[in-house]
Amino acid sequence: MTGHDTGHAAAASAISFPVHVARLSKNGMEVTIEADEAERAALAAAHGLVGVDRLVARLDVAGWKQGGVRVTGTVEADIVQQCIVTLDPVAAHVDEAVAATFLPEGSRLAVPVYSAEGEILLDAEGEDAPELFSGDTVDVGQLAEEFFALGIDPYPRKPGAVLAGGGEGGEKRGPLHDKLAELKKKL
């Protein structure tokens, strides 16, 4: 997911920015990624968008515990999508908070916590479990792209756009509905 080998081939991010973990200073580092025209075109194609007008990621990358990395920050973008009703262009804004933790493969900190029954315990409201990385780099650009993708509305609609045929309230009922209504009355 972030430029590390997890057993499956992932396409390289258009905004790839590898950070060498061993070279991180004690105070970490600030990373600002501002996508250029070619990178924005590649992001638009990769995510099925009409266009990406602007994308800026501001990230703080710091060492975390024993060889790990903690990344926090934001990803902001102005995008153009296709309305799912009219197919007209729809402008949208993406503003996502970024928070992720990475540990090197084989780290003892990556061992999951088990219950007495042998089940892995997860806290649904807590932070995500750390991701593992191999090698000596973490691709924070790819991480920023993942959070960018999370902020894209999967069903963009132009204001005032409605489905033809009364799909929003004026629902047509057919013979199946009538049969089910009769069956419901019998119960």
Image (cartoon, rainbow, N blue to C red):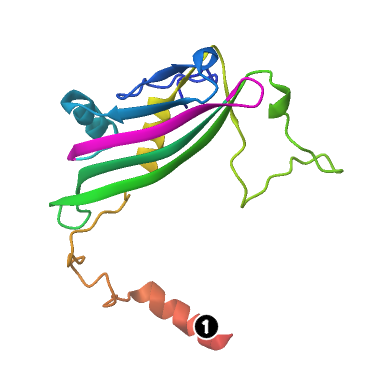
Few, some or many residues within 10 Å of mark 1 (<14, 14–19, 20+): few
Q: Nearer the viewer, residue 2 or 120?
A: 2
**Picture residue at 18% right of the left edge, 59% below the top:** 158
- Does the magenta run of residues contain 100? no
**Residue at 67% over, 48% down:** 123
Q: Which image quadrant is residue 57 in?
A: top left
**Residue at the left extreme?**
88
Q: Quadrant of residue 141?
A: top left
x and y, in percent, of residue 20 in the image: 48, 14
Residue 60 covered by magenta stretch: yes
Which secondary structure is most common in the magenta stretch?
A: strand
Q: Answer with left or right where residue 120 lies relative to residue 127.
A: right
Q: Which quadrant holds residue 114?
A: top right
Seen at 68% across and 18% down, the residue is: 106
Which amino acid type is shown beneath numbered disc 1?
Lys
Q: How many marks?
A: 1
Q: Is residue 18 above or below residue 163?
A: above
Answer yes or no: is residue 66 visible.
yes
- Name the residue: 22% across, 58% down: 157
Q: Position of residue 21 (x, y in %)?
A: 52, 17
Would residue 151 be seen by someone viewing this image from the given angle? no
Disc 1: which residue: 184
Residue lying at the far right in this picture: please name it: 116
- Closer-to-camera residue (144/173): 144
Q: Where residue 127 sits: x, y (%)?
A: 60, 44
Chain part drawn in magenta:
50-68
Nearest to the observer: residue 59 or residue 77: 59
| Identity of the residue furthest to the front in this view | 27
Secondary structure type for disc 1: helix
Query: At which x and y percent is residue 59?
Result: 41, 33
Give the quadrant of the C terminus.
bottom right
